[in-house]
Image (cartoon, rainbow, N blue to C red):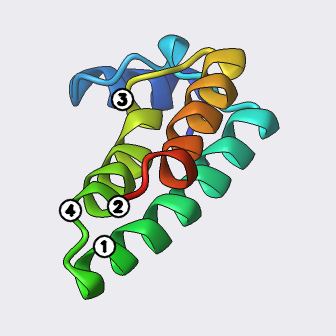
Amino acid sequence: MPSQQDLSTILNAYGVNPSSMNFSWANIMAWLIFGIIGFCAFNYGRKERNYRALTIGIVLMVYPYFVSNTLWLYVLGTGISSLLYFWKD
């Protein structure tokens, strides 16, 4: 089994900085929760040809890749998810 140093070297070779990634359980749960909400909104928007729901679904599935702070993951996810309810036709 490779050591931690070997794994860091391999990840750095591919341009991934392991120290900048935040893999806490709270972050993983946020990724799952808002990813599932986004996937459901995306499918609904695609079937109903509702481009607002489709766009919000894509944003919910993608934004966790760019936000690493746990608090901001939940704040932005809740705000974007609330757009599904408040921004109706």
Q: Are marks 3 and 2 in contact (CB under 8 Å)?
A: no
Rendered image: mark on residue 11: 3
Q: What's the residue type where badge 1 is placed?
A: Gly
Q: What's the residue type where badge 3 is placed?
A: Leu
Q: Are marks 2 and 4 in contact (CB under 8 Å)?
A: yes
| Residue 33 location (% of width, % of height) | 67, 55
Q: Earlier in the sequence, mark 4 or mark 3?
A: 3
What residue do we see at 56% from left, 65% from top? 36
Q: Earlier in the sequence, mark 2 or mark 1?
A: 1
Q: Earlier in the sequence, mark 3 or mark 2?
A: 3
Rendered image: mark on residue 8: none
Q: Vertical placement of 68 versus 87: above or below?
A: above
Rendered image: mark on residue 51: 4
In terms of image quadrants, where is residue 54?
A: bottom left
User: Of residues 8 and 74, which is closer to you in this image?
Assistant: 74
| Residue 62 location (% of width, % of height) | 35, 44
- 2 displayed left or right of 61: right
Label 1: state its secondary structure: helix
Q: Are marks 2 and 1 in contact (CB under 8 Å)?
A: yes
C-alpha separation, residue under disc 1 versus residue under disc 4: 6 Å
| Residue 44 location (% of width, % of height) | 38, 79
What residue do we see at 80% from left, 39% from top? 25
Rendered image: mark on residue 53: 2
Residue assigned mark 1:
45
